[in-house]
Image: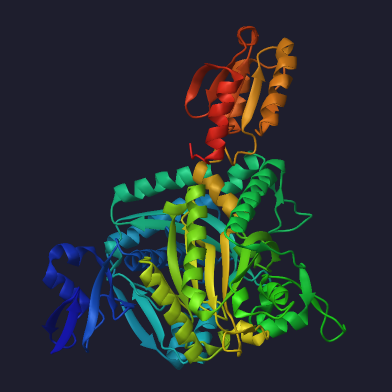
Amino acid sequence: MININLKGEIKAFESGISPMEIAKGIGMGLFKAACAAKIDNTVVDLRTPITEDCTLEILTFDDDEGKRAYWHSTSHILAQAVKRLYPDAQLAIGPAVDGGFYYDFGFSSPITEEDLPKIEAEMKKIIKENLSIERFELSGKEAEDALNGQIYKEELMAEHIAKGEAISFYKQGEFTDLCAGPHLASTGLIKAVKLTSITGAYWRGDSNKEMLTRIYGTAFPKQTMLEEHLTMLEEAKKRDHNKLGRELELFTTSSLIGQGLPILLPKGAKVVQILQRFVEDEEARRGWQLTKTPFMAKSDLYKLSGHWDHYRDGMFVLGDEEKDDEVMALRPMTCPFQYQAYLNKPRSYRDLPIRYDETSTLFRNEASGEMHGLIRVRQFTISEGHLMCRPDQLEDEFRKCLDLTTFMLQTLGLYEDVSYRFSQWDPNDREKYIGTPEQWDEAQGTMKTILDDLGLSYKIGVGEAAFYGPKLDIQIKNVHGKEDTLITIQIDQMLAKTFGMEYTDKDGEKKNPYIIHRTSIGCYERTLALLIEKYAGAFPLWLAPIQVKVLPIADRHHDEARKLQDSLMMAGLRVEVDDRSEKIGYKIREAQLEKVPYMLVLGDKDIENGTISVRHRKDGDLGAMTIEEFLTMATKEADTKEIR
């Protein structure tokens, strides 16, 4: 007999029992809804035999891991359908992703969007066949034979063999695929499926490798859930910053400049300028000191910091070490530069904490397949900061950094949209990190204590830490459900010693400070993208690039419109006059499409009465007001950063 912990209740079962059998014993509702299981934090198939005491959790579609098993199983159905219709297709990878799944294929002849309904119909046939999904392991020649000339799978298998990992396969009907799982028990458990798009994708995300065909899809346990999701996708397309940001003339791109190098147009640049001024002023109020450091440095700096060994592939290197006396690199982060500011003079314990912030332009050599609009780019600007403190100050300063980010998120209206990830090192991948296990245990223990004391709800990301320390990642999803890191706060107990950063303590001894790496609003380009999507381009008044449009009804009203514009601009508002010879209804519609918060209509009656007719993009006609009345209302809304 073995003892299994089920939500805190210990129950005895015969050794070899499966999670599926346990779920059935609990109730048919759970049995039918089960997608996978978690045994001691490892996600497994429902038919996995349990032979030792453990903690067991039955995962349904309501759980993230359950969704991933559901969607990953559907990706195999997609691959099986493709192989039935295109027998010579090469299979690459088919993971679950946020909102669904994809599978990459190598086709001998290109397929298009028009082919998706045919593939989807074949998938539904496979689902109706209710094929059992079975896991098995092979090794050596048997594994190679099972792959049957699948070149991408052979490459993946060779990597598994090199790591000493088991080679597992999944079989459903005539279809077999190299896969680690987990999967559902049968294809018939998929109830509603839809293929959503087709695109190109480089093998392993490397632009030097062949281009494959990526087919995206999604699936749900109920048709109504699928329909709700598809409706959400349509709304997402309307809000997609990559589309809407261009339509609103916030940014553009140029093939002559290059991928991942967007151009902020005047309106987009104005929003970022407003954000930067807001952030720098708020940070100054909280005791941060502004620095301005170079965009590049000698390789010596990056070798000392560890970036040369751990991050070089992500850097833009200028020069050749074998040919040039001095090799430079554009900076991927600012920390080693601000350390030099700390080293400018001797420091005492009385000087600490020292808080340096900077609006930093950074450069990272992102793979071409990873870049997307303003979300992931090769040159970006970030609200970066590094704080040097004594060990006894660490917890309080970390709290203050988190309080700063919370204030920023609340002000922007993004606070309810974020989640938290405690990113830790992977002790099984030592080459990825510097420092000793003891140092990592101490740093991670310190951060855990702080996060738990704060009562912060977070997920743990093993292997997601920076190479020098653990971090709190504040995560956010774009309208398509893709999650990215918006803000990070990191504890670093190692690099101060590496750089010789010291302070003289009360006892006269030289000691190394602890360092907190942090952003307050993250990358401005990414934040702009998320704000476009959050507000569908209709920014709150304080952020709107154009806050007011003055709309003269006829040409004879232009002079008064210009005087009104001057008055409003002197009061600090951003104002444009639409003096085109168009009907007023057309001008109003155009201003609405541009997402301008306020429209001021000016005609004969308004000029005669000394008033303006005020319209709001959301609330419509607000009636006639004096200029003073409008200014009082608008400036209060802008100054309080009201979200409306």
Q: Quadrant of the N terminus?
A: bottom left
Residue 221, percent from left and from top: 29, 56
Q: Quadrant of residue 292?
A: bottom right
Left or right for 232, reference 19:
right
Residue 548, percent from left and from top: 62, 29
Left or right for 110, reference 643:
right
Q: Is residue 115 visible?
A: yes
Q: Is residue 426 visible?
A: no
Q: Quadrant of residue 28?
A: bottom left
Query: Does 574 sit above or below residue 138?
Result: above
Query: Does 277 sit above or below residue 327?
Result: above
Tally the marks. 0
Residue 318, percent from left and from top: 81, 74
Residue appearing at x 57%, y 81% in the figure: 468
Q: How is the image coloured?
A: rainbow
Q: Nearer the viewer, residue 337 or 269?
A: 337
Residue 614, percent from left and from top: 55, 20
Residue appearing at x 57%, y 33% in the figure: 635
Q: Nearer the viewer, residue 469 or 71?
A: 469
Residue appearing at x 45%, y 53% in the figure: 415
Left or right for 569, reference 418:
right
Q: Nearer the viewer, residue 542 or 377?
A: 542
